[in-house]
């Protein structure tokens, strides 16, 4: 740089050189927020792909016979060229478009977080309709595992060899939604692929045992020497969960909670930090709460997790708040947050909920690009990349993926942190402009906006994980 400037210096006056340096500096500042500071590195978070291989249903019959390495060519020859629209799960063209954008973003990323729900909603029912395999049969369960392996392989390719840490979601099961079978064939069939995604050398020695027991595991962070990744399958803790294909569901959920507590205690004792990866956010389901029909406000509150797991998990988040350096989830398909508090009630962390690739619940497809400091380990900012022309794209190659926003710029913050997330949240209840309108627009990834009348429920869900605290915020306001 200095050599180039010296060689051209005779052509420019000092005033002109000052103008050039000013323009270069302004350009750098304009580009910097997506990656934080110049010293920061980047990672991706993607979630809720919900791939639907039954488009068209007639083309799915061959997939059950083909090796997954042949699926892409077959799907490309069979599928409608148009990406799936709002109200539908991800078809092959939308998958292609999303993976192409993820691959572009991954070229500068250190690693990828994949927080669950790889296959479509109602997968056993779709399988029966297209292939004739009844739900719960060995053939149906095998096809769910095969489809999962296909999505895993496509994400692995898009990541370009970077580590990918996979959290299973509620649809990721051979037996149906919220039906993961502990120690069952689905976990057995996907275990090697999950190991390959993360890198076997990063996984804890008990990976095989814990993954087969319930889809949870520990791994070394790929770039931060003193950080452990703890990956859990909290579909086991959902009020919707059951184990129709086995008999160990309740025991598996309790065992996972005990395992998580031990891992956090050991990390704290060793002075290590933890990044927590899971699918279902903690706290309250604002969407379901707003639509519940019970007579009183308190009776209408719908928790994300069942007891005793809701309280047990929230207690662990508070007790080990100084150990949990970052937390990431998906599940609700929208751009959301959960503030994590210590035992005194102070906000000390954020669980970041990433938007979905699947547009089935009306939002635009999107994913997050985070910047983080490799020295301190702090997450410093994030940008949302989204598909801006879902309604008009005629084929995968038409997709216009754009940067929707950068957190720090959108909310006038110095970066993304527990304190900046709390400052944003405080302007949602009561609504303070322009922050409230910005949040309402960004929540569905710029496809419509969250209703103003619904905002209080969502704001209280962001700020308070415990049912009684949410009730005080929402029902007693």
Image (cartoon, rainbow, N blue to C red):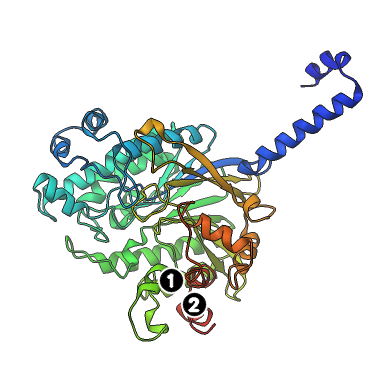
**Considering only vertical position in the picture, is 257 above or below 224?**
below
Q: Name the residue under label 2.
A: 470
Query: Number of labelled discs?
Result: 2
Disc 1 is placed on an element classified as loop
| Residue toward you, 169 or 472 | 472
Mark nearer the N terminus (2 vs 1): 1
Q: Which residue corresponds to the image point at 23% horizontal and 58% vertical from the top-left? A: 181
Q: Name the residue under label 1.
A: 284
- Horizontally, residue 374 falls left or right of residue 215, namely right
Where residue 273 appears, as percent x and y from the top left, is 56, 56
Q: Which mark is residue 372?
A: none
**Considering only vertical position in the picture, is 108 above or below 436?**
above
| Dot 2 and dot 1 residues touching (CB under 8 Å) | yes
Q: What is the quadrant of residue 272 in the picture?
A: bottom right
Disc 2 is placed on an element classified as helix
Where residue 180 appears, as percent x and y from the top left, is 25, 58
Q: Which residue corresponds to the image point at 53% horizontal and 38% vertical from the top-left? A: 110
């Amino acid at each position: 740089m200095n050599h180039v400037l010296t060689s051209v210096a005779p052509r420019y006056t000092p005033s002109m050189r000052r103008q050039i340096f000013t323009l270069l500096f302004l350009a750098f500042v304009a580009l910097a927020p997506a990656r934080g500071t110049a010293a920061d590195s980047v990672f991706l978070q993607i979630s809720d792909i919900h791939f639907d291989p039954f488009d068209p249903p007639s083309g799915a019959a061959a997939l059950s016979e083909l090796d997954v390495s042949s699926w892409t060519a077959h799907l490309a020859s069979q599928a409608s060229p148009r990406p799936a629209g709002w109200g539908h799960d991800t078809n092959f063209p939308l998958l292609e478009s999303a993976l192409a954008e993820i691959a572009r973003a991954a070229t500068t990323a250190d690693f990828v977080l994949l927080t669950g729900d790889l296959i479509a909603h109602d997968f056993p029912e779709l399988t029966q309709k297209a292939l004739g395999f009844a739900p719960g049969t060995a053939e149906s369960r095998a096809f769910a595992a095969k489809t999962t392996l296909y999505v895993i392989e496509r994400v692995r390719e898009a990541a370009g060899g970077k580590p990918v840490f996979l959290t299973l979601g509620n649809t990721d099961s051979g037996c149906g939604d919220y039906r993961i079978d502990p120690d069952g064939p689905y976990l057995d069939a996907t275990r090697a692929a999950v190991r390959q995604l993360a890198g076997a050398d990063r996984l804890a020695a008990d990976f095989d045992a814990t993954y087969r027991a319930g889809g949870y595991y520990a791994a070394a962070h790929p770039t931060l020497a003193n950080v452990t990744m703890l990956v859990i399958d909290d579909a086991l803790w959902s009020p919707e969960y059951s184990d129709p294909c086995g008999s160990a569901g309740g025991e598996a959920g309790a065992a996972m909670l005990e395992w998580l507590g031990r891992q956090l205690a050991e990390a704290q004792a060793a002075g290590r930090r933890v990044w927590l990866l899971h699918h279902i956010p903690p706290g309250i389901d604002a969407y379901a709460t707003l639509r519940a029909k019970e007579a009183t406000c308190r009776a209408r509150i719908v928790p994300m997790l069942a007891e005793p797991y809701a309280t047990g998990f929230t207690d662990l988040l508070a007790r080990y708040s100084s150990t949990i350096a970052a937390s990431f989830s998906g599940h609700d398909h929208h751009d959301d947050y959960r503030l994590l508090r210590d035992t005194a009630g102070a906000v000390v962390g954020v669980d970041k909920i990433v938007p979905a690739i699947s547009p089935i619940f009306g939002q635009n497809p999107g994913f997050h690009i985070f910047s983080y400091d490799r020295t301190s380990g702090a997450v410093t900012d994030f940008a949302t990349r989204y598909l801006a022309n879902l309604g008009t794209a005629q084929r995968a190659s038409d997709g216009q993926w754009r940067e929707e926003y950068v957190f720090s710029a959108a909310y006038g913050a110095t970066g993304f942190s527990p304190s900046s997330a709390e400052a944003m949240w405080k302007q949602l209840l009561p609504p303070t402009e322009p922050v409230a309108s910005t949040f309402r627009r960004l929540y569905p990834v710029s496809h419509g906006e969250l209703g103003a009348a619904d905002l209080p429920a969502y704001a209280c869900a962001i700020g308070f994980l415990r049912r009684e605290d949410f009730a005080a915020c929402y029902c007693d306001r």
